Image (tube, grey):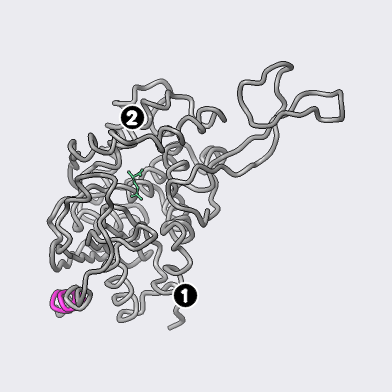
Amino acid sequence: SPIPDYLQVVVDHSSYDNPGHNASYISELRDADPNRVGACLSTVDGVVYAAGDTDVEFTIQSISKAFVYALALEQNGLEAVLERVGVEPSGEAFNELSLEQVGTKEIADGYTSTGLWIRRRSGNSGPLETDTRRPLNPMINAGAITAHTLIGPAGISADERFELIRKGLSAFAGRDLGVDEAAFESEMNTAYRNTAIACMLRNYDLIDVEPEDVVKAYTRQCAISVTARDLALMATTLANGGVQPLTEERVVRPEVVRQVLSVMMTCGMYNGAGDWVSSVGIPAKSAVSGGIMAALPGQLGIATFSTRLDKHGTSVRGVRICKRLSDDMGLHIMHAP
Ligand code: GLN
């Protein structure tokens, strides 16, 4: 097949220069070799093509959000998840402290510990009301942290929940995935913003676990180690309607995949989503570690790895590679054949 040579050409052409910057807030990401670049493509029948650095491990970071959202949907169903996490693009950075208002709820008289504003339903009398809120979508940290807590039976420990998530992501990849403990430790050293987000979620009763515990387990989720090959196969499991192409295990139902890919399409690239959808046109998710994974329903999964990022936190050469593949192979979802 000519595909491997072609893929190598695309990778080489993406590297005429190497602009952007490594993420700096986690030392393991800051110090990662910026010259590495790789691309992997896997068809739904499990044929894998790779070029460049596709066996180098890096932390999955935000790409985990798509898979944890899938596991949360598989376990709880769409309705229950939608109550806690919306599906609207935020147009904001991934770590924004924001919640959309979804309605109001009646609260007991004198109960004022949660909710930013409290009022009486009619003038000076009537029951007290406060606003109810939820994160805009599961791809920003607020939604991802909420989705994380929806995994596993109520009352399990943060460690047990993390283990379920690690196993779930491993099922998507078709191999047992480990954790980069050093990257986990360094992100925890400065995880104040995610702690603030978790406290905000706890305040609105969107999560019912301790903010410190959930931030630890969520940060460990982000530190799960993958290669571009793993990510391509994980994407292909989505493209294949939820069945891992090599192990043939059904990981999630087709309805779950539809929901996840829809949200990836609109929210996967944060505030760069419009640019990505129009120029590449494949549901995708990026990560600050330099990975991008994209899934084209019924056809293939793509993953790229290159650590230098643009202003949205997305790999510069990764975007170039995906755009080229999309153009050359007519992968854009809106492209009329
Ligand atoms: N662990 C990172 C965070 O929560 C993930 C961010 C990302 O990949 N965009 O800040």
Magenta segment main secondary structure: helix
Say which residue label 1 marks: 334
Some atom of ligand 1 lies within 8 Å of the CB belonging to the residue at label 1: no
On screen, 202 above or below 289? Answer: above
Three-letter amino acid code of the residue under disc 2: Arg
Expressed as whole percent of the image width and height from the top left, the position of residue 241 reads 37, 56
In the image, taking residue 109 as reference, residue 87 lies left or right, namely left
Expressed as whole percent of the image width and height from the top left, the position of residue 88 reads 55, 53
Q: Are there few (<14), some (14-19), or many (20+) residues within 10 Å of tag 2?
A: many
Q: Which mark is residue 168?
A: none
On screen, 88 above or below 106? Answer: below
Task: Decide if residue 38 is in sight here.
Answer: yes
Q: Are marks 2 and 1 in contact (CB under 8 Å)?
A: no
275 and 46: which is toward the camera: 275
Secondary structure of the residue carrying tag 1 is: loop
Task: Decide if residue 73 is in sight here.
Answer: no
Expressed as whole percent of the image width and height from the top left, the position of residue 301 reads 29, 63
Secondary structure of the residue carrying tag 2 is: helix
91 and 238: which is toward the camera: 91
Magenta segment: 4-10
Expressed as whole percent of the image width and height from the top left, the position of residue 229 reads 19, 58
Tell me how far mark 2 sits from mark 1, CA to CA.
Answer: 38 Å
**Magenta highlight on residue 6:** yes
Query: Residue 124's image quarter?
Result: top right
Tell which residue pokes out farthest to the top in this image: 110
N-term-proximal mark, 2 vs 1:
2
In the image, taking residue 34 as reference, residue 209 lies left or right, namely right
| Quarter of the figure that contains the C terminus | bottom left
Say which residue label 2 marks: 161
**Magenta highlight on residue 234:** no
Three-letter amino acid code of the residue under disc 1: Met
